[in-house]
Image (tube, rainbow, N blue to C red):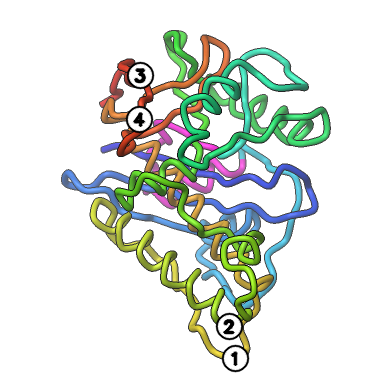
Amino acid sequence: MGVVLGIDPAWTEANPSGVAVLQEVDGRWRCRAVAPGYSSFLALARGEAVDWRAEPHGGAPDPGRILDAARTLCRGAEVDVVAVDMPVSRIPFEQRRPADDLAARALNKAGCGVHSPTPERPGKISAIMSGGLLARGYQVAGTGSISAGMRPLIEAYPHPAAMSLLGVTYRVPYKTSRTSKYWPGEPPAVRIARLLDLWTRLRDALGASIDGIGLPLPKGDGGLTLSGMKRYEDALDALICAWVGTKFLEGACAPLGDRDAAIWVPPLPGVDIGNRRSPGWR
């Protein structure tokens, strides 16, 4: 059996972060838990259900506690790979990395530009995440090998992963903060309905290889707001990161980067991501 932990970390402490953990059972992946914030994920490990109506809390990550919660949720099994949607590296960085430039060159035509890291974003949060995971035996996976006795920490990018899931050749418009740019002039109700349709399609695509996805998408009624939908987007991104982790384990992801840092991307229709693939960790 394998275990994959997916995290969609907010790049500052002010915002919440989605978390999901998958476990392989009888040749199929099963979602053991998905939550819209660190605190609600830790609460799941204590047997407390997620209240999806409540506003999730922000805060800095505690990688050790997150790993311990994942182990509890997976019946004592250790996490084999951690996949995060955030720049991480084996060496300190405060600006754009070779991984960012390589990913931009490969993915810009598909509408998947890459944000430039700064000392503030993700800065401290990235250092806490990668440092805390390193202390627990996880090493950033670049184009080189992982040190003996270490497990991989991979950097995922949900936008190209969403393209891969839906089999499309251009960026999927599923982010709540960008709906006015996706569909200018459309009222919020229309934009919400379109988001929910895309989220349902992504969840169904994930369900082709992951059982038991406990992400209860909201109903598109009059009481729903775009800001109130962000928690579902964060949880969905965590699930997508975890799915990328399963593809990494299967040897089906390509690294865009160098030995110190790489963005791992699954196969994409119409996009050349090179011939190198993850080594497979089964």
Which class describes the residues within 10 Å of circle 4: few (<14), some (14-19), or many (20+)? many
1 or 2: mark nearer the eye: 2
Quadrant of the rendering where the C terminus is positioned:
top left
- Total numbered labels placed on residues in the image: 4
Q: Residue furthest right?
A: 120
* Frontmost residue, 11 versus 212: 11
Q: In this view, which residue lies farthest toward the left?
A: 26
Task: Name the element at disc 1.
Answer: loop
Residue 189: assigned label? 2
Q: Estimate how packed mark 3 is, as few (under 14), some (14 to 19) or many (20 or more) residues with alpha carbons within 10 Å.
A: few
The alpha-carbon separation of the residues under discs 3 and 4 comes to 15 Å
The residue tagged 1 is 222
Q: CA distance from mark 3 to mark 2?
A: 41 Å
CB atoms of marks 3 and 2 within 8 Å? no
Distance between the alpha carbons at the discs numbered 4 and 2: 38 Å
Q: Residue at x 77, y 30 (%)?
A: 123
Q: Earlier in the sequence, mark 4 or mark 2?
A: 2
Q: Are marks 3 and 1 in contact (CB under 8 Å)?
A: no
- Identify the element where label 4 is drawn: helix
Furthest-bottom residue in this view:
222
Asked if the residue under mark 4 is in contact with the one under mark 1, i.e. CB atoms within 8 Å, the reply is no
The answer to whether residue 40 is above or below residue 221 is above
Residue 142 in the image, given as x and y percentages of width and height? 49, 16
Q: Mark 3 belongs to which amino acid?
A: Gly
**Which residue is labeled 4 in the image?**
248
Residue where numbered disc 3 is placed: 274
**In the image: residue 172, left or right of residue 96:** left
